Image: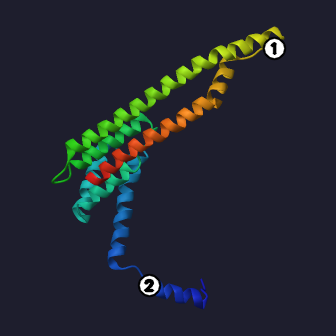
Amino acid sequence: MDLSPRAQERLARIGSLSEAEQQRLRQNAELEAVLTPFFTGMATTEELWQQVKDLSASTGPDTIRQAQTRITDTLRLQMNPDDFEKRKAALLALETLKESGKYSALELLLGSIVSLRQRYEDVKQQALDQIRQQLEGQVRAAAEQARRQGMLVDTESTLEASLKSSPEWRDFIMRHDAGAQKTLDDYLARIRAML
């Protein structure tokens, strides 16, 4: 590929990667190769533990922290409970590879996230049920009026559509999501600082 003289000049100014940068890129690629099967469900927590242990023996203990950080970065408020538990188990397992691990503190923070996720879902369901109850009377009255006029109305579908488009629901879910996400972000920041 022929580059213009200006492009060649820019490339010359940028220079090549230093040895440390090349090594960091190699280590990142190796870690990615270890984490990808775990994230795709092709590797168990035990297999991940062994692979990170082997990799950290050749690349240094910082590899453990990097693996834990990448796993922590994937934790979400609304993720599948099985995926969350798998990542939680992996974080705790990898913590055992550290000489001065903080297993108990990490376990406590992860338990707080489990509780947060449960409270988030419970409060969300309670609000949904409450708003559903408020709208149900209105939808049934409208359906009865439509029936008198000779029209059939699917009250259940109408109720669900009314519920999801309800300004009360949208306002609640926006505030509820923002509050829970802020709390989750705080927990995750504490975990990252601990790693």
Residue 155 image position (x, y, % from top left): 69, 16
Q: Colour scheme of this structure image?
A: rainbow
Q: Nearer the viewer, residue 34 or 94?
A: 94
Q: Is residue 28 visible?
A: yes
Question: Which amino acid does the dot numbered 1 rest on?
Answer: Met
**Total labels drawn:** 2
Can you identify the residue that label 1 sits on?
151
Q: Secondary structure at mark 2?
A: loop
From the viewer's perspective, is the residue at label 1 or at label 2 nearer?
Answer: 1
Quadrant into which the N terminus falls: bottom right
Residue 78 image position (x, y, % from top left): 46, 38
Label number found at residue 170: none
Q: Earlier in the sequence, mark 1 or mark 2?
A: 2
Residue reaching furthest to the top: 148
Can you identify the residue that label 2 sits on?
15
Which residue occupies 53% across, 20% down? 130
Q: Residues within 10 Å of mark 2 (few under 14, many from 20)?
A: few
Residue reaching furthest to the right: 149
Q: Is residue 195 visible?
A: no
Residue 83 vertical position relative to residue 155 in the rendered view, above or below: below
Residue 83 image position (x, y, % from top left): 40, 39
Residue 23 vertical position relative to residue 12 in the rendered view, above or below: above
Which residue occupies 58% across, 17% down? 133
Which residue occupies 47% across, 87% down? 13
